Image (cartoon, grey):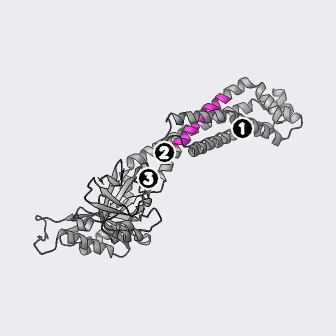
Amino acid sequence: MNKKLYTQIKNEWRSNLWLLAELLVVSVVMWYIMDNVYSNLATYYEPRGFNADHCYLISMGALNEQNEGYQPYVEGGRSQKEEVLELLNRIQHRPGVEAASLSQNSFPYNGSNSSSPVQCDTMRTTGFVVRRIFTPDFLRVFQYRGANGETPEQLIEVLQENRHNMLLSNNLFQRYGVGVKELVGKDIYVGGDTTRTYRIGAALQDVRYSDFQQARYSYCFCLSHLITSGWIDKDAELCVRVRPDEDHDFINRLLADAERLYRVGNIYIANVRSFDDIRYHFQKAQTDSLRNILMGMAFLLINIFLGLLGTFWFRTQQRRGEIALHKVHGATNGAVFSRLITEGVLLLLLVTPIAVALDILLAHFELNSWHNGTTLEWPRLALCAAMTFGIIALMIVVGIWYPARKAMHVQPAEALHAE
């Protein structure tokens, strides 16, 4: 059967040539779509290095001299820093709160950042290295983990061992081919100041800047100097993690108790936002862009599907006489159907190597999507090419199956008479 099929394809080379050209174009375009979708979704679903579920940001306000109830700060009295720390303590002891922390320019999905270069031996960082300064419980709020599997509690112990210990994302010196977990215990310098030495306490799992930026491009280092630095005031970030079973209507319940339980001197709770809301607004433009890309790709896929479906549908309809002839010679419905499907898939197999060669060429000249620092990743190319082949093969099967099924229900004599 295969020999006869090859002979038939060869004899019908003129009509098959146009079909092969169509399959080639469709294969390359389909691969480009698959590659783009894969790159965007692989980046989006990459591990974030933190967990902001059930977390909230509490913004604090402070009364001034013009406000009723203002309490002047006097020498020897309570300072604004102490009021903020007292509010933090009360929040930490609120039923349902799992952890709470203070920080400066540190919480995720935050466009206001601080940055400093970092140096270890002769290795220097490049790019934007986010500096995160916080109280140790910040690690519990956002569930940071170490590159060697350390829990937030173990990382907190590292910071509390020595105030000069720092946590660095494991990818900080990746351009040197060195992971930070190999450098634990070494001295480092921050901001080019070689007079102030810090120590690498532990390596963090890479912490992403947002859902649309890969971890390989997101660098950070963390300090727990916030309390001793004198930077605690009403502008500090008060972040809270709530137990999942208590995370229902948390904002309204907290605000209802705010004046009665969480007014400390001149410090009060001004606003509460969930990190679901912060995340949504921080990357709304990028989320909309990704949605538009996926919708555009889906529209192209539907058009390709309908076009390819129509081609094979029409081709099978035109061959009703041939199907009848096969049945006259004793071929079963299954054999006829198998022959038609095999022919379509065989044509796709013939054109696939050329399509893959063109895919490689497009990737080589960087005309497709960037991912993991390159456009030509062999596993990614192979996966997208396999997905492309599978989808087109399915379109071919659907395009042949229905008209062939109808044709096989027609009596051979009737089909041959019409022919």
Residue that mark 1 sits on: 345
Callout 3 amino acid? Ala
Q: Quadrant of the C terminus?
A: top right
Residue 302 coordinates in the image, percent (x, y): 58, 39
Classed neighbour count for the residue bearing mark 1: other residues with Cα under 10 Å, few (<14), some (14–19), many (≥20):
some
- Residue 212 seen by the camera: no
Direction top: furthest residue: 14
Residue 117, placed above or below residue 140:
above
Compare marks 1 and 2 and give the one earlier in the sequence. Answer: 1
User: Majority secondary structure of the magenta segment?
Assistant: helix
Question: Regarding mark 1 in the picture, which secondary structure is present there?
Answer: helix
Q: CA distance from mark 2 to mark 3?
A: 11 Å
Q: Indicate the secondary structure of the residue bearing disc 3.
A: helix
Magenta region: 20-36
Quadrant including the N terminus: top right
Report, in whole angstroms, how far the alpha carbon at label 3 lies from the one at label 1.
Answer: 40 Å
Q: Residue at x 32, y 73 (%)?
A: 92
- Residue at position x 53%, y 37% in the image: 363
| Left-right relation of 181 to 272 | right
Percent position of residue 387, x then y: 62, 44
Residue 258 appears in view: yes
Query: In front: 359, or 194?
Result: 194
Residue 158: give its label: none
Q: Mark 1: which amino acid?
A: Val
Please give the residue where the numbered disc 3 appears in the rendered image: 215
Q: Amino acid at mark 2?
A: His
> What number is the disc on residue 371?
2
Mark 2: few, some, or many residues within 10 Å (few <14, many ≥20)?
some
Give the residue drawn at x 35%, y 64%: 56
The stretch drawn in magenta includes residue 25: yes
Q: Earlier in the sequence, mark 3 or mark 1?
A: 3
Q: Point out residue 275 in the picture as x, y percentages from the top left corner.
A: 37, 60
